[in-house]
Amino acid sequence: MTSHPPDQTEQKRLNSQIEALKGQVATLRSTQAKHARIGEIQQMQRDLAAWLSVCPDLQTAGKDVLEQLIWLEGIDYAALHLSNGDGHFELVAEQTQLDNPLQRSGTLDSTSALTRLIRTNDALYFSRSELQSNNIFPIVDREPGRGNLGCGALLPLKYGGEIEAVLVAVSISREDLPDFIRDLLESIAALTAGTIARLRAKQALEESERRFRDVAEELKRHRDNLEELVAERTADLSRANERLKREVSDRHRAEEEKEKLESQLRQSQKMQAIGALAGGIAHDFNNILSSAMGFTELAISEAGDNVRLGECLEHVSIAHQRAADLVRQILTFSRQAENTRRPIRLQPVVKEVIQLLRSTLPTTIRISPDISADCGPVAADLSQIHQVVMNLCTNAYHAMRAEGGLLAVSMSTVELDAHMLTNEARVVSPEATPGPYVCIRVSDTGQGIDEQTQKRIFEPYFTTKKIGEGTGLGLATVHGIVQNHGGVIRLRSTVNQGTAFDVYFPLCDREQVAPGARASIAPLKGSECILFVDDEEQINLLAEMALADLGYQVHSRASSIEALEAFRANPDRFDVVVTDQTMPQLTGGELAKKMLEIRPDLPIVLCTGYSDALTAKMADKLGIREYVTKPVITRELAAAIRRALRS
């Protein structure tokens, strides 16, 4: 069959269909490409959103967003401007696909499209003609005057109603941006705005945390400083409190010491008053005793065969001696008696006291002596040691007289150490030091002494005896004698079990055994001429009679002035002068001094009943050869005269 070519009409119709099919194919292909591009864009949005959610900082986020924008079809340049808080937006990042970058301004300000953007508060899209006008966009043509800019967009990045940043997108090839690109730009802008807000919130949080850490550190420093300050103040307060406690304690001790010193002062003043009174009484009483004892001696010598008269006079002499001992005890207590110490053994004194006690104590009280013969000598006054032992034994007797008991008197040598002197001694002399001592212990099984009484037992006039049974001077006298002898007293007592007094006297190096307490001295006769001076006429009369019986020539004067005149008249007439100490006008010491100025070799014997004005040492310095205390019996005075003449 022969084919006929189609006619022109048909050909046109076919061509038209072919072109239509081509258009459909092109459209289909374009649609498929758009769908594929949209899928890619959506995936890009998802990836961008995921990345922005973990993006660490604004610079990185801006760079990534701009890279995604440049990837979009037709976008040739993109930039990100951040608000600096004063109405300007500074360029922080930009991206471009152009070989020749666009000329741009680094800041969006009120002269640009920013004013319009802020006013509309929405995305702005610019056509080619708008981009070519002045000051409408922050970029200019690559080649001014050639109109190379196609279109562009300003997208506000808002958070909380405020524009935080501006996204710039520019196309060179397009005259306008299609809707899906615009939607995509706005979506990216929203994602970026959220990211910027998140990052700024994170930055603000970090700044807050930093500030909080700084504040916390500052608070910690302040707290540490405060704790240190509190510790310092607490330490200061503690030290101040300790100082206050010490001051209060010191003040309390000072007040106690003040009270103690005031008490001691009152006691010293009392003792001074008593001493002055005792001295005056002793002087007068010793003068009386001297006369009484002297005339009794003469009476005994004149009694002859009258035995009864002799016995009576002996009893009178004993009473006189007791009175003399009482005066001596008063003077010892008041510290007016001269303490003449010499090396002696104490065994005879203690044995004599025990012997006297056996004849006077009731049979209900047993005496148990234990006197060691090995005890060495001590430097002591014989009569005062006798007083100490007798007073302690008398107190022991009073503690047991109601029910009886055992009185133990012992004597031994002991070694005292510093601990005993410091912690156990009740009385310690300032002279006492560690070393060997002779200990006289007097103990009883009586009623004992309570602690409060022990604290006051050595006080003068303190006594637990009934009125008329004691003077309160016994233990005070013991206290004074022991202290004067450099000794120590220890007291141990338990109520209803008994009491023990330990009296310690320090051993001395040199031994010189003294005679007994009542050893007699044979009268020493002489023929020398004696000037006897005393303001008591009876004593002068006694001296004339007693010394004349011994062969002496006695010239007496009742006035020291008269005696001095008689001596001056004939200094060589008198072989020895015996003078009283306490006299009106001139004392015995003053009289002796004036006589020795005339005759330095003159033997002088001074008699005194009150030794405070002139002690034995003071008399020796004046040149007085013998010093005797009243009351003095004839044989003692005669012995002193013989010693003065020999020396």
Image (cartoon, rainbow, N blue to C red):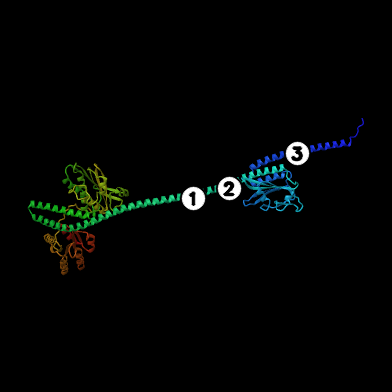
Residue matched to label 2: 207
Q: Position of residue 35 (x, y in %)?
A: 73, 38
Of the two numbered discs 2 and 1 in the rendering, the one whose residue sits closer to the viewer? 2
Along the viewing direction, whichever of 341 and 188 lies nearer the viewer? 188
Would you call the spot at circle 2 few (<14 residues within 10 Å), some (14-19), or many (20 or more)? few
Q: Position of residue 144 (x, y in %)?
A: 75, 53
Residue matched to label 1: 225
Residue 604, disc: none
Q: Label 3, label 1: how many angstroms apart (C-alpha)?
A: 73 Å
Q: Label 2, label 3: how many angstroms apart (C-alpha)?
A: 48 Å
Would you call the spot at circle 3 few (<14 residues within 10 Å), some (14-19), or many (20 or more)? few
Q: Amino acid at mark 2?
A: Glu
Q: Amino acid at mark 1?
A: Asn
Q: Earlier in the sequence, mark 3 or mark 1?
A: 3
Whether residue 367 is visible? no
The secondary element bearing badge 3 is classed as helix
The answer to whether the residue labelled 2 contacts the one labelled 1, judged by CB atoms less than 8 Å apart, is: no
Of the two numbered discs 3 and 1 in the rendering, the one whose residue sits closer to the viewer? 3
Q: Label 2, label 1: how many angstroms apart (C-alpha)?
A: 26 Å
Residue 33, disc: 3
Q: Position of residue 82 (x, y in %)?
A: 65, 49
The secondary element bearing badge 1 is classed as helix
Indicate the quadrant containing the N terminus: top left, top right, bottom left or bottom right: top right
Q: Position of residue 501 (x, y in %)?
A: 25, 47
Taking the view exactly as shown, the residue that stands out farthest to the left is 306
Indicate the quadrant containing the C terminus: top left, top right, bottom left or bottom right: bottom left
In this rendering, is residue 34 above or below 585?
Answer: above
